[in-house]
Amino acid sequence: MGETFSWWGILSAIGVLTGLGITFGALLGMVSERFKGEANPLVEQIDALLPQTQCGQCGYPGCRPYAEAINQGDAINKCPPGGEMTIHALADLLGREPAPLDGEAATDDSVAFIREAECIGCTKCIQACPVDAIIGAAKQMHTVIEDECTGCDLCVAPCPVDCIDMLPRAKPLSQWQPVFHTTPSLIVSDRASARSEHASL
Amino acid sequence: MPAYDFPGGIYPPERKSRTSQAPLCAAPLPSRVQLRLRQHAGNPASPCVAEGDTVQVGQRIAKREGMVSANLHASISGMVSHIDDEAITIDADGLDKWQMLSALDWRTASPHSLLERLEESGLAGLGGAGFPTHVKAQVAGHHAIDTLIVNAAECEPYITADDLTLRSYPHEVLDGAQLIAKLCGARQIMVGIEDNKPQAIQALQHVLTEQQHPIEVTLKVIETRYPSGGERQLIKKLLNRDVPSNGLPVDVGVLCHNPGTLLAALHSVRDGKPLVERIITLTGGAIRHPGNVWVRLGMSVAELLNHAGLSRERLYQVISGGPMMGTPLFTLEMPVLKTTNCLIAATRDELPPVPAESPCIRCGACESVCPEQLLPQQLHWYNQTEADDTLEKLHLFDCIECGACSFVCPSYIPLVQEYRAAKQRIRLKRIESAKSEHAKHRFEFRQARLAREEAEKQARRQARLAQNRQSTTGPHAGPNTAPVADLRSLRIAQTAAKAAVKKAEKVLARATEQAPNQRHDDLEIQLATAQENLKAADTRLAEARAAVPQKEAP
Amino acid sequence: MSMMHASPLGAAPSTAHLMRWVIIATLPGLGAMTYYFGLGVVSNVLLAALIALGAEALVLTLRSRPLRPALTDSSALLSGVLLGASLPPASPWWLIGIGVLAAIIVAKQLYGGLGHNPFNPAMVGYALLLVSFPAYMTLWSPPQPLVTETLWSQIIGSLPTAALDGLSGATPLDAFKHKGEAVLASEFWASQPLPEGTLSAWRNIALAWLAGGLLLIAKRIISWHIPVAMLGSITLLAALFYASDPSHFASPLFHLLTGATLFGAFFIATDPVTAATSRRGKLIFGAGIGVLVMIIRSLGGYPDAIAFAVLLMNLCVPLLDIYTVPRPSGQPKPARLPTQGGPQ
């Protein structure tokens, strides 16, 4: 035993492996520095994931300010128009835990509509609109530009005569999306699909 | 046989003999027609008649809307009974009174008047895609076209409409081809036809030998293999040219037209007859009198099939178009469209329901038949997780939806259906992201405007305060109460704002240069935003300078 | 508006149809093996097939998936038959059971079932048995008449170990492998190392597998790319080795006609689920298997290497799929897939 046991053998093995580890670690580090992709600043990336309705339901005056706040550490679950999808995308991007939505989920895509006969021309809604989608002047009737409206309903509350409705936005037939189910045959999908099959029975 | 070939392809059962041997006849006049406002690719037409109006056959009832769109004409004489967002309904008076346009001689007429006529007649491709013909003809202005291909391959099973068109009207079709070729400046015409239509080939050969044509016409008989009638496949086969990805045949100097479209073009020019009827193949085991018929547009499918002897007991499904690319109809209360080339009233034995889908075993059968050399099984895989970026990288949008992959799939996966859904999903996503991008720019502009207004207000207040102070206490008395502004950072901000304006201007100018016909709303808003920011920076800087003049002077 | 489901013209043969044809094509090979090695081959295949179906049913029940479509598609049956065919005749039931359970449960169903397994199930089972029970996996009795009295006791595993030695024979590859470095190939053959007829038996079995494989190609169940690439690379490498030193290496013909070469080329490597999909990918995949087989056979520690070679190349399939994407029509460049999150 004494003859086969050699400190030198052990040490050389440790030395060689450590050396290899250090060399390749350094190589990896160098490569990752050398070929680093140009990444957007984080705020830009967060902003790109937000739905840009500028509704202010998060408590910030628009999506960009909220993106900045998230970057400063604010919660990622304050965006009702974005819903679960946005929360998960943000969680992925930032490596945080997805949290349930704070507030009520947005219903279908909607658009503001001013009942023009009742409008008194106070311009309060114009000032509230984050995307300048309402036109009109003082003492003149106002109207909403449908294509520009993001459906944020920020104009509804300021109206003194309650003449603004949020209507469901009409989807053109050409944007019809077929309902199509794919059932991936993965183990992780088994329980859920089995449960839903039972539920449907 | 041409030396070139396209990859992939399949040999489905043809089932054309039932209709190819029956004579071409006319369907009876419908008692009511429902004319869809969108029977063509592009924007729907907008009605130009009112309910209660009396119209004659060939009278325009809806106008084209925007660049890519087509006019719509009454296909029966009678009264307009209903108009809604989708369609105009006309009740027939049974008189069949026509209102023709003036006749033109295509040999002598100016290109401009010919184009106008094609547009006026509401012509759209009758092969299936329904692209407005006048728009297709106009591309000659932007692209050099050297070849017009008459796409008579008709590779889908069952359909024989083009076959019958060529056999019945070989002169007219070739004249129509001359007309279009002249209009787009093509130097040669090629007729691509599959070798399973010997009578049509004979008819064409006969016309070609006995008649001189100003533009050279070559007849190319090709092997019968699906989907040789796909534009890209036919161009590859006849000319060995590859239409680029996301491109159109015009990118390689080619225009493709269906024989039916050419016939309709000639009718509209020579006779002044707008597009109000077309030839449709009625076939399938559930009708007694299969064959090809002239049908007025807007006639109900149920009426048409009943006329052909539809047996409801034997009927399993009705497919509009061919069995490969067509769509099953949920209801027979559907009007015939400009793009309806075939109605198959199939029995259950003939087109049975597809067996249940099983998992993909990656056998690669789909890949070997794909005429576009895509990887259908990879597209299927990535579609399961909606990996849309990867789908686009795999050229999902080059898929021509021919259905060859679905045809050979041993697992019966509805591949084409998946691809269509994925394409639509990606298109919607693009629309959504463009919309949110737009809203973002408008929001930024508003923020900039508010900031500028605020700065201006501040500046006015400062000026007023300074004036008040001067008038009351004199110039050099009292401590300076104005906030000490950091002139240096304001100057930097102003320079940055200037640079931003310049950059936005440059981007807008470049975009305008590259695509002069498109609108660049978002870029304009971005420029306006930058300008607002610059104004605000200017104001703040001026204000700060005015407030602390003594500090700036050394 | 509705959309066409898969093509209603319905001319495509189903997955089950493909699987059944592969099973039918194993009959010549299995027949020849039975002729030379006795009913032990039949018992292997039947036992493996039964256990495979049972295991598939068990896992599907646990996954609450419908049983009928998965059982009738014959894919589990095929895995069982292929594994059964690769085991030494009259293997004990527990050996077959372990191999098949590993194949169906671990290699196939745990990855998500048919179409989702990255490794060839039959070969996973085989490789597991080969490394775990090498003694049993080399028990190729010499070719002998059809029925042996010991068959039953062999299957139930009650044969005394002393009897095992009496039964054991070597495959030609085995014998050649263990001839020792000092022995020259010519001396080896001169010494008549194998019982009478062994070599011709293996050759005829290989030809029977070849017949089945050609049937599959003729029926367009498999494409020619993988077998041709694999056999081609084996022939080429064997010829190179043989030319470099005929005294130590066997001839190309020996490599082609012994062991599981032809069986592997037509029945194992062509499993679509675990093979590359593009034509170019298939050629590389097949050639890679051939190269690995030759390297392991000639330089490695195992006499035969189809299982290891196939499994190693299965590992490379995602990479092959990414780098052999064909150029779509009208495309200047082939599509390039992301290197993450690919299929399998």
Image (tube, rainbow, N blue to C red):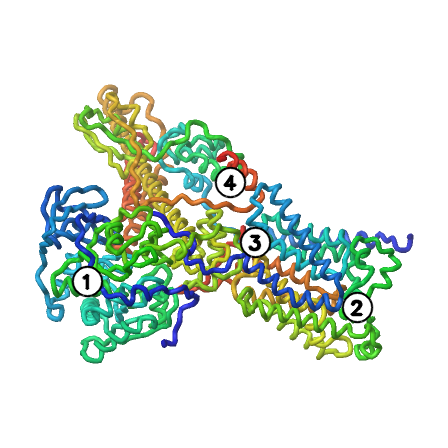
Which three-letter amino acid code belongs to the residue tagged 1? Ala
Residue B3, given in percent of the width and then of the height, sits at: 38, 76
Query: Do the CB atoms of the residues marked 2 and 1 lie less than 8 Å apart?
Result: no
Q: How far separated are the C-alphas under marks 2 and 3? A: 36 Å
Residue B416, given in percent of the width and then of the height, sits at: 41, 54
Closer-to-camera residue (B142/C112): C112
Q: Which chain carries label 3?
A: C
Residue C188 shows in the view = yes
Q: Residue B264 carries which label?
A: 1
Q: Name the residue under label 3.
A: C73
Q: Mark 2 lies on which chain?
A: C
Closer to viewer: mark 1 or mark 3: 3
Which three-letter amino acid code belongs to the residue tagged 3? Asp
Q: If the image is split into quadrants, where does the N terminus of chain B sit? A: bottom left
Q: Mark 4 points at which residue?
A: A92
Query: Do the CB atoms of the residues marked 4 and 1 lie less than 8 Å apart?
Result: no
Q: If the image is split into quadrants, where does the C terminus of chain B sit? A: top left
Question: Could you confirm whether marks 2 and 1 are on the same chain?
Answer: no
Q: Mark 2 points at which residue?
A: C144
* Image position of B149 with respect to B475: above or below: below
Q: Is mark 4 on a helix, strand or loop?
A: helix
Which three-letter amino acid code belongs to the residue tagged 2? Gln
* Image position of C27 with respect to B543: above or below: below
- Mark 2 surroundings: few (<14), some (14-19) or many (≥20) residues within 10 A: some
Q: How far separated are the C-alphas under marks 4 and 2? A: 65 Å
